[in-house]
Image (cartoon, helix red, strand yellow):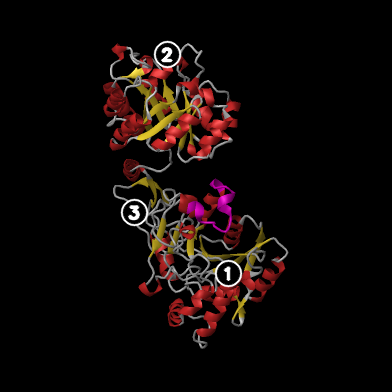
Amino acid sequence: MTEIIAEIANAHEGKVELATSLVESIGDSADGCKFQLFTADELAFESHPDYDVFRELEMTPDEWESVIEVARDAGLSVYADVFGEESLELADGLAVDGYKVHNADVSNTPLLEAIANRDGEVLLSAGGSTWIELAEALETFDEERVTLMYGFQNYPTAPEDANLSRLEKLSEEFECRVGYASHVAGDHSLATDIPRLAVVAGAEAIEVHVTLDRSERGTDYESALEPQEFAEMASSIRSVEELLGGQTFDLTDSEFEYRKNHKKWLVATERIEVGEELTAENVGYRRLPDPDGSSPLDIGSVLGKTASEPIEKTSVIKWQQLDMNVVATLACRAESSRMYGKPLQRVGDRPILAHLVERLKRAAVIDEIVLAIADTPSRSAFVEFANKYNLEYIVGSEPDVLDRLIQAGNAANADHIARVTTENPFVYWENLDELVREHAEHNADLTTTRDLPLGTTVEIVALDALEKAHKHGGDKYRSELCTLFLVEHPQCFTIQAFDPPEHLNRPEIRLTIDNPEDLVLARRLYDLTDATVTDPPLGKLVKTIDENPDIMSLNDQFPDGTDNDIQCVRPFMYGNRDTES
């Protein structure tokens, strides 16, 4: 929301009663107010023609404190123009929320450094300053604290000098907020329009002078609005904000309703029998009066597929009606900086990767397992593993994990992949049949189980969704966090996350193997669990942990599935589906 700041400046004329009245007049329409704190000696020598005027505008610290107390009671943030050490110390004593650096001091390095050593927001005047001056001033600050306030005072400033396009340029050049300080004549027809137009142009803060009565021609009256005008301007800005909406591609509720009524869905244009191939003649796009909530499929992903059940004319095409291929694609590399060769480390009598493969083979819905091997010196070890276990494999880019998974899926003609990291020997395979069934019924792009022990979750992902992620996402999304693009763009993809059985809802348990301590725990857990079971189910492993709770201390210095750092990249696995929480 745009921050609306009432610039009181020196309109108080050195009178505490007038300053108080000014604050009270904008208490309901502004978010903050700003004063100029100074002493005459700080601004000029006694020989300056305006020295006596500056002296008359001074107020004592006690007077300032009483005025600011009124502002606090009105819920206003308080900013102070500071011009030197004296006014800065006064501002500190008044505990202001932020400081304004006047254009005159943009190159005043000692003052900038003094402000930088204090807490609080910084409003930095950008009007009348060269871009190099601004760049060098910003070197003093953490840019997250700074709002560049463009605008300048010519008592008043002509509307044609508003130059609102400068806001976009400032945003492009500097990594901080931009705002606009309007100084057009208060009685000009554009006086309340220019601030709201500045919001359209990108201003995140608006600063406008205020006076009780322009006809009195008090200090700074030329560009000031009267309280009612200020309130009308503020209301207009709020209306503009509603019209602008958010700077996001997220669809609004109204857009979703429109989409529901107008989006074409892939449907059967005639009855399709079991075993019949889907072609451009028997499927096509049509509007539906009442879509069932599943996602529309892309025609390119289903042409050539055969029906596994009869599909009635006008029915939405769903993966559950088709012979689809689900392939487990396992990204393999040994060159981890935390622990070398994690997938090939042994737990019990076999490598971790062998445990994983055996568990995945138990799921009837997994049609094939393909290794996606990184092209590194360790690749020969994984090729040897693939040959030993009669698995297909591909070799691809080490950093582009996502591309390797896509290549592996395409090598096996996958429609969907089961995605799990290869350092997890205890994955929860027991619900994979159900997970794939739910995935297919709703034409989902990503389906998983949340709140399982860390390192046991399998993701079911549509291969074309991963291809879109690779096409539209950057390097950030091509690492081992290969479904992160989907998670961060939930309106572009259909994502489902299901709760596990209550006894497996244990995100605080860490069973992934990322560090040597994790490997020690995994080996200990495996030895403690019933030796007659080759690959014990997850429930049995959790029971062993509950019977031997001390073993969890072996890796408790590492984050578990309730950790914020984990949930921020895996919200659908480890907690709330709300990615904004």
Residue behind mark 3: 293
Whole-percent x, y for residue 109 in the image: 58, 30
Whole-percent x, y for residue 202 in the image: 44, 30
CA gap, disc 1 and disc 3: 36 Å
Q: Would residue 144 be visible to someone looking at this image?
A: yes
Residue behind mark 1: 423
Relative placement, left or right, of 353 versus 162 is right
Above-or-below relation of 263 to 465? above
* Within-10-Å neighbours for mark 2: few <14, some 14–19, many 20+: some
Q: What residue do we see at 43% from left, 83% from top?
A: 547
Residue lying furthest bottom in this view?
532
Q: Quadrant of residue 543?
A: bottom left
Residue behind mark 2: 155
CA gap, disc 2 and disc 3: 61 Å
Q: Quadrant of residue 520?
A: bottom right
Q: Earlier in the sequence, mark 1 or mark 3?
A: 3
Judged by depth in the image, the label closer to the viewer, 1 or 3, is 1
Residue type of the residue flagged with mark 2: Tyr
The boundaries of the magenta stretch are 471-486
Residue type of the residue flagged with mark 3: Gly
Secondary element under disc 3, as helix, strand or loop, is loop
Of 201 and 31, nearer the camera is 31
